[in-house]
Amino acid sequence: MSINADLDGGSSSTPDNRTGADASVESPTTLPNGTGDGKDGSLTAARLLEMTARDTDRWRSEAKTESEAIVANAREESAEMVRAAREEAERLVTSAREEAAQTTNDARVEAHRVREETTALRKQHDEDVAQLERVATENREQLRQHLTEMLARVDATTPPDSSHH
């Protein structure tokens, strides 16, 4: 698209195919010797410079507006990404805390279970030791009684003075 076509929408044209604001600018008058009229040429150049300046200002304004919109969108996206990252970090921290609490609780439950099991085993062993001590005492008494009975039988079967012969 040309600068001139962009100026007024670019749709109106003149018989010599000039469009837009360009159509109102007369072509420089050519003198019979082939030189252009300096005044008309200066006016045309001034108008072209004016149109170029207007177009340049408009394009600069459009570019500034567009760049501001891009920066605003980038800031919004950045803020959204930061917010999402913070939420994810908070979610991960919360999840880690919950998992740590669950692990700690599981460890406490296991420690309590092991303590109970150890206490029950110790009690059972103490009872077993006590039972074995009772059995040992009973066996000792039975052996003593049996030995006493055997000695009494031996004494009863032996003649009283037969050992002095």
Image: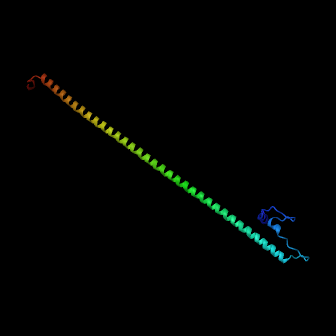
Q: Position of residue 12 (x, y in %)?
A: 82, 62
Is residue 156 found left or right of 72 in the rendered image? left
The N terminus is located in which quarter? bottom right
Q: Position of residue 2 (x, y in %)?
A: 78, 64
Between 24 and 152, the one nearer to me in the picture? 24
Is residue 152 found left or right of 52 in the rendered image? left
Q: Determine the residue located farthest toward the right in the rendered image.
A: 32
The C terminus is located in which quarter? top left
Between 128 and 5, the one nearer to me in the picture? 5
Please say if 111 is above or below 74.
above
Please say if 109 is above or below 89.
above
Q: Residue at x 35, y 42 (%)?
A: 115
Between 68 and 121, the one nearer to me in the picture? 68
Q: In the figure, residue 55 lies in which quadrant?
A: bottom right
Q: In the figure, residue 4 lies in which quadrant?
A: bottom right
Is residue 85 found left or right of 116 in the rendered image? right
Please say if 122 is above or below 100.
above
| Colour basis | rainbow
Q: Position of residue 77 (x, y in %)?
A: 60, 57
Q: Position of residue 96 (x, y in %)?
A: 47, 50
Between 145 and 161, the one nearer to me in the picture? 145
Q: In the figure, residue 42 lies in which quadrant?
A: bottom right
Q: Residue at x 83, y 77 (%)?
A: 39
Q: Residue at x 86, y 76 (%)?
A: 37
Please say if 40 is above or below 64.
below
Q: Residue at x 80, y 65 (%)?
A: 20
Q: How many marks?
A: 0
